[in-house]
Image: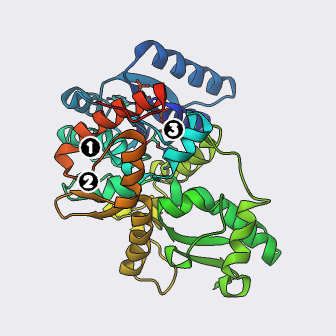
Amino acid sequence: MRKIMIIGAGDLGRRVCGELAHRDRRWEVRLVGRTEDALQRDVNLIRFSALQQGCRSRVDYALTDLDDVARTAEVIAEFAPDVVFLAASLQSWWVITTLPAERFQRLYAANFGPWLPMHLVPVHKAMRAVRAAGSQAVVVNAAYPDVVHPVLATAGLAPHVGIGNVANNVPALRHSAGTILGTDPADVDVRLVTHHYVSHRLSRTTDISPTQLRIAILAEGRDALPDIGLSRLLKPLTTEYRRTGGMAGQAMTAASAMSVLVPLLEQREAVVHAPGPLGLPGGYPVAVGSGPVRLALPSGMTEQEAVDVNRSGQVEDGVRAIGDDGTVLFEESTMDVMRRELGYDCTTMPLSEAEDRARELGTRFARYRENGSVGRV
Ligand SMILES: NC(=O)c1ccc[n+]([C@@H]2O[C@H](COP(=O)([O-])OP(=O)(O)OC[C@H]3O[C@@H](n4cnc5c(N)ncnc54)[C@H](OP(=O)(O)O)[C@@H]3O)[C@@H](O)[C@H]2O)c1
């Protein structure tokens, strides 16, 4: 029986656990969190509803706090998973959306980069635990892989591949191209290279710089994009192919996660989209499931060209550069917003300081939520 461990029992971890359990397979699925009562009830809901539909996977749970790396290593070693899915975060992307609308809009202008420590810290701890367990599992991470992975790669601790972001728009692109070409979207193959910054915006605005993404639309053996035109392809994503967002929209993220996890569990090759493969910045088409994760770039595109496209998106997201030792330089313009709104000021962050920064961000954000002013720590 193939085994998968999901670490992080929040909204996304539970969704993916449910999706895996509801496949008609005999996988062993273990959901790992830190609050036993909630975890027990969540796992029971998933396994009972799966059994009700005749599904035969085994689903259970284990307890650990990622702050305890040794205990997490024990939990991993004891289960010996083939695949580990990381869905832990100190503050998911949607938390700022729960602010009053006007305050949310002001903070949203900082983009996602400055929140990096909230995603980096738990993944860093989980990866240290994976190594301490001596695990050979393929590690797949949901938490801001576009930036978390290149940072952790500098310490030899990058997960193998991410999920979501670049992938979340691919089905809408297939629909858009299929409609224009008069082809079933299932027969349209897309190759998209772009960073979280752009993938987050594709369904919200047509104001996307062509230098920040590269797309090939493969239909009947050739790239149909020159015939279709980029703006004609993208526009419907903001109109008839908009999808429900927010927490409910995490159904799309869970589907993107499954597009990576299922081929890995079944050990069959699939070309899918994923951020952070091989410790690279941003998102790419990749081949997963048979052998190591590999890039599956649009024909004629080099790895360096793809990385350059992603680096330009990374800067827009608020991360100017990642040093060879993992030190992150943040963009001044986005940090200005954080300074003004939260009183948070971090232009340079060595990996060793990420946890202090996460703690400070958490405290300042809590004050901001309370009284809407600069949070003094
Ligand atoms: N790539 C994408 O397209 C995409 C899309 C959506 C979300 N995401 C990312 O996926 C991640 C998870 O999102 P979510 O919405 O599921 O967030 P969530 O509901 O807040 O879940 C995060 C989980 O992490 C757990 N956690 C935090 N610190 C921990 C620790 N020390 N030990 C054990 N568990 C710990 C939390 O546990 P407690 O419940 O005990 O606090 C919580 O269950 C976030 O980074 C989010 O931004 C990515």
Task: Say if mark 2 contacts mark 1, CB within 8 Å.
Answer: yes
User: Element at badge 1?
Assistant: helix
Q: Which of 61 and 238 is in front in this view?
A: 238
Q: Nearer the viewer, residue 154 or 109?
A: 109
x%, y% of residue 232? 74, 76
> Where ligand 1 lies, by image quadrant?
top left
Query: Residue 124, which numbered label?
Result: 1
Residue designated by label 3 = 96
**Chain-order first, disc 3 or disc 1:** 3
**Residue at (29% x, 35% y) in the render:** 360
In the figure, 14 relative to 238: above or below? above
Q: What residue type is labelled 1?
A: His
**Residue at (72% x, 69% y) in the render:** 235
x%, y% of residue 116? 35, 48
x%, y% of residue 7? 39, 34
Residue designated by label 2 = 152
Q: Gap in Å between the C-alphas at discs 2 and 1?
A: 7 Å
In the figure, 69 relative to 228: above or below? above
Please state, as top left, top right, bottom left or bottom right, where the N terminus lies in the image: top left
In the figure, 297 relative to 62: above or below? below
